[in-house]
Image: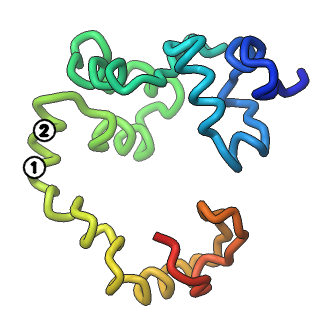
Amino acid sequence: MPTATAGDPAALARDFDLRRLSPDFYADPYPVYHTLRAREPVKRMPDGSLFLTRFRDVQAVYRDPKTFSSDKTVEFRPKYGDSPLYTHHTTSLVFNDPPRHTRVRKLIAGALTARDRGHGAGTRPARRRLAGRRGRTRTHRSDRRLRVGDSGGDHR
């Protein structure tokens, strides 16, 4: 299927599929988000899931765990069976609803601050050492290819 472009907003909204994103989307997703918000703010994906583009819709989903649950126990059982991967995916913070999510989040709140996540200027050397050991490559907002661990300037 050809990739729809921003020049054809109707086709862009109609054909949007998270499984087939173009390099242009990765370089600059904001025109696509704008088009989806204007034409199809709640986009039904080919797999049946919903892709939300408006803050108020996302907020409503997060505030209604009875309707929009993060619990994956039923969905993940056939995929992972009774395995460590199943345990991980069904006990992880992101796959839990309140009140368990809230209780766990409070316990780890200190680790969720920007400084503790490694976003402060004083953490760059440690992040570079860690990333350098992993040897992965990433693309940064500046669209330059960087070897993770290179100094590459200030990328905040």
Q: Residue furthest front?
A: 7
Percent across and percent down for residue 102 are: 13, 38
Q: Secondary structure at mark 1?
A: helix
Q: CA distance from mark 1 to mark 2?
A: 6 Å
Disc 1 crowd rating (10 Å Cα; few below 14, some 14-19, many 20+) is: few
Q: Which residue is mark 2?
A: 102
99 versus 135 height, above or below? above
Which residue position is annotated with label 1? 106
| Pick the front one: 24 or 115 | 24
- The amino acid sitting under disc 2 is Thr
- Quarter location, residue 67: top left
Classify residue 66 as left or right of residue 87.
left
- Mark 1 touches mark 2? (CB < 8 Å): yes
Question: Which residue is at 63% across, 65% downward?
Answer: 142
Query: Residue visible at 59% across and 20% down?
Result: 36
- At which x and y percent is residue 129? 49, 87
Label 2: state its secondary structure: helix
Front residue of 3/71: it is 3
**Where, by quadrant of the figure, is residue 73 drawn?**
top left
- In percent of width and height, residue 95 lies at 32, 34
* Residue most extreme to the right: 2
> From the image, which quarter does the N terminus lie in?
top right
* Type of the residue with mark 1: Lys
Q: Is residue 76 left or right of residue 106?
A: right
Q: Position of residue 35 (x, y in %)?
A: 62, 22
Residue neighbourhood size for the residue with mark 2, other residues' Cα within 10 Å, grouped as few (<14), some (14–19), many (≥20): few
Drawn side of residue 30 relative to residue 90, left or right: right
Identify the residue at horizontal 70%, vertical 50% (top origin): 27
Q: Quadrant of residue 38?
A: top right
What sort of colour scheme is used for the picture?
Answer: rainbow
Name the residue located 52 percent from the left edge and 73 percent from the top edge.
Answer: 155
